[in-house]
């Protein structure tokens, strides 16, 4: 009887661990979105400084700050995009296995959908800030 209890505990722990991993990935995506938002603000601030620069040297100095921000932000965006794709694929796989009615599936679908919308919105803002700087 003890073996049956242990195996049921192991089976119960598996979905919890799975969801814990899911929420860990969700936090990574949320942090990436926050960092992209901050980078967008930084790009806008640099753009403002370039416009207000009184010498070519100052303008170039401000502009040189932009490249490392863009590189780091692009890496974060790629990571977030890949994680969102993986989360969506795992959710679809889970949905196929457990059915539409599973609370876990609904939680995952809602979370992935919300994060995807936020990611798309923040990426649009980021691209607009880059375009504004280029012009």
Image: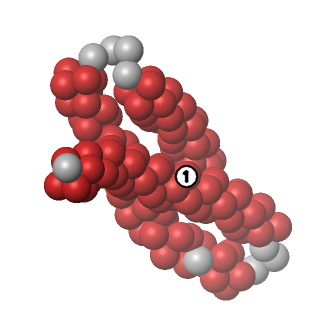
| Residue under the point 32% across and 45% down | 12
* Placement of 34 over or under 125, stated as above or below: below
Q: Residue furthest front?
A: 1
Crowdedness near tag 1: few (<14), some (14–19) or many (≥20) residues, C-alpha within 10 Å: some
Q: Colour mode?
A: secondary structure
Residue 52 found in image quarter:
bottom right
Q: Nearer the viewer, residue 123 or 92?
A: 92
Q: Residue at x 42, y 53 (%)?
A: 20
Q: To which quarter of the image does residue 66 belong? A: bottom right
- 117 or 8: nearer the eye? 8
Residue toward you, 88 or 34: 88
Residue 14 seen by the camera: no
**Residue 53 found in image quarter:** bottom right
Q: Position of residue 15 (x, y in %)?
A: 33, 44
* Residue named by callout 1: 30
Location of residue 19 with respect to 32 vertically, above or below: above
In the rendered image, the vertical position of residue 62 relative to residue 10, given as above or below: below
């Amino acid at each position: 009887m003890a073996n049956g209890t242990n195996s049921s505990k192991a089976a119960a722990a598996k979905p919890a661990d799975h969801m814990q991993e899911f929420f860990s990935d969700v936090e990574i995506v949320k942090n990436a979105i926050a960092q992209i938002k901050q980078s967008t603000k930084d790009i806008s601030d640099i753009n403002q400084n370039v416009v207000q620069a009184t010498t070519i040297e100052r303008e170039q100095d401000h502009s040189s700050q932009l490249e490392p921000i863009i590189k780091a932000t692009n890496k974060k965006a790629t990571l977030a995009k890949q994680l969102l794709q993986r989360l969506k694929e795992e959710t679809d796989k889970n949905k196929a296995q457990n059915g539409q009615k599973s609370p876990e599936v609904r939680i995952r679908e809602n979370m992935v959908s919300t994060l995807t919308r936020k990611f798309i919105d923040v990426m649009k803002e980021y691209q607009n800030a880059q375009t504004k700087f280029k012009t």
